[in-house]
């Protein structure tokens, strides 16, 4: 397949490297010139488990300079950049191109559907972890998987073919008509850990140094999943809570993306995570006190950082 990855940060580069290693024609699209130049010159250093290698068969480009139409466009930009990122590649999105979002948060599929026909939009969620360790250097610790479906709920054979390509590249992908359950459970996970780390400055495992950290994270999980259930989405609260506690116990030194953004004085994805949950909660009259307080605190931190 001809695949373009829109957003070549940690996740985008990791996925692009895995897919290129599986003999797909992959182009990484980003505006980080240093990262792109290093990949163009030396290839992408990809560390996955015990494997450490250079992927040299990757193409790189700024989004607006891409000329060829991909079969699949995978969107990994932060949610606040989704609309602008898609506008930068509108010249190559063809009538047969599928667009897959594996982004964090809520609302990305709706944004993509503004410029891509809904029947060509795929929505999904991934549990793969990845860290960008430097220019042209990414690593993934542990295993993950992908669950995806057609955004309009209609099963299409092309979705099966795309899932097979991702799975054959070692990314453990399945088509799952209940992917909204996984999306909301991941939103609960991120609303708890990302926002808590962003305002406290703690790495994930440091939240477990006092009982209050894990207890507050679990309260947020309950609130977010209450909203999901009010929307008619079946979610597994016990599984989600277990995943959060496992992360606190085992993700030693891991700084989630929202904390990294705060430290780098960048805007965060708080509006598409906690913010989107609060909007939905108000519409459904579901109380989400802790989730909203963390939303307000991250907004304060962002305001301070932009002074």
Image (cartoon, rainbow, N blue to C red):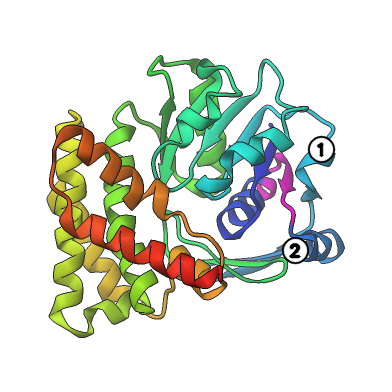
Q: Nearer the viewer, residue 271 or 131?
A: 271
Residues at marks 1 and 2 touching, judged by CB atoms closer than 8 Å: no
Q: Is residue 215 left or right of residue 188?
A: left
The numbered mark, 1 or 2, whose residue comes first in the sequence reads 2
Which quarter of the figure has residue 251?
Answer: bottom left
Instruction: From the image, tell me which residue sits under label 2.
Output: 35
Vertical side of 228 occupied by 232: above or below: above
What span is in magenta? 20-31
Q: Nearer the viewer, residue 295 or 131?
A: 295
The answer to whether residue 16 shows anywhere in this view is yes
Q: Quadrant of the C terminus?
A: bottom right
Spot occupied by residue 34 in the image (x, y as percentages of width and height): 79, 66
Query: Badge 1 local density, few (<14 within 10 Å), some, or many (20+)?
Result: some
Residue in the picture at 13% in, 47% down: 287
Q: Does dot 1 land on a helix, a strand or a loop?
A: loop
Residue in the picture at 46% in, 60% down: 129
Instruction: From the image, tell me which residue sits under label 1.
Output: 66
Q: Is residue 179 left or right of residue 228?
A: right
The answer to whether residue 49 shows anywhere in this view is no
Spot occupied by residue 191 in the image (x, y as percentages of width and height): 31, 56
Which quarter of the figure has residue 25?
Answer: top right
Q: Is residue 232 left or right of residue 52?
A: left
Spot occupied by residue 33 in the image (x, y as percentages of width and height): 80, 60
Residue in the picture at 54% in, 50% down: 78
Task: Report how far apart the C-alphas of labels 1 and 2 lie in the structure.
Answer: 17 Å
Q: Is residue 81 left or right of residue 144?
A: right
């Amino acid at each position: 397949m001809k695949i373009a990855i829109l957003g070549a940060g940690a996740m985008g580069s990791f996925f692009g490297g895995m897919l290129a290693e599986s003999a797909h024609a992959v182009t990484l699209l980003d505006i980080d010139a240093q990262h792109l130049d290093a990949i163009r010159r030396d290839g992408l250093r990809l560390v996955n488990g015990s494997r450490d290698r250079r992927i040299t068969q990757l193409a790189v480009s700024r989004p607006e300079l891409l000329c060829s139409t991909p079969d699949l466009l995978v969107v990994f930009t932060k949610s606040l950049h989704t609309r602008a990122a898609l506008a930068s590649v509108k010249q190559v999105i063809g009538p047969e191109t599928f667009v897959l979002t594996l982004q964090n948060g809520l609302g990305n599929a709706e944004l993509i559907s503004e410029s891509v026909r809904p029947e060509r939009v795929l929505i999904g969620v991934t549990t793969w972890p990845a860290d960008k360790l430097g220019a042209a250097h990414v690593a993934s610790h542990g295993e993950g998987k992908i669950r995806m479906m057609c955004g309009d709920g209609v099963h299409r054979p092309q979705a099966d073919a795309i899932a097979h390509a991702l799975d054959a590249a070692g990314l453990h992908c399945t088509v799952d008509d209940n992917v909204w359950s996984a999306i909301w459970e991941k939103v609960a996970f991120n609303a708890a850990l990302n926002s808590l780390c962003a305002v406290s400055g703690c790495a994930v495992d440091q939240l477990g140094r006092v009982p209050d950290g894990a207890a507050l994270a679990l309260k947020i999980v309950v609130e977010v999943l209450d909203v999901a259930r009010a929307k008619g989405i079946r979610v597994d609260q016990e599984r989600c809570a277990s995943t959060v506690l496992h992360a606190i116990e085992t993700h030693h030194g891991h700084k989630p993306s929202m904390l990294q953004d705060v430290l780098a004085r960048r805007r965060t994805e708080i509006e598409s995570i906690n913010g989107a949950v609060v909007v939905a909660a108000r519409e459904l009259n579901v109380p989400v006190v802790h989730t909203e307080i963390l939303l307000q605190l991250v907004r304060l931190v962002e305001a301070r950082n932009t002074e």
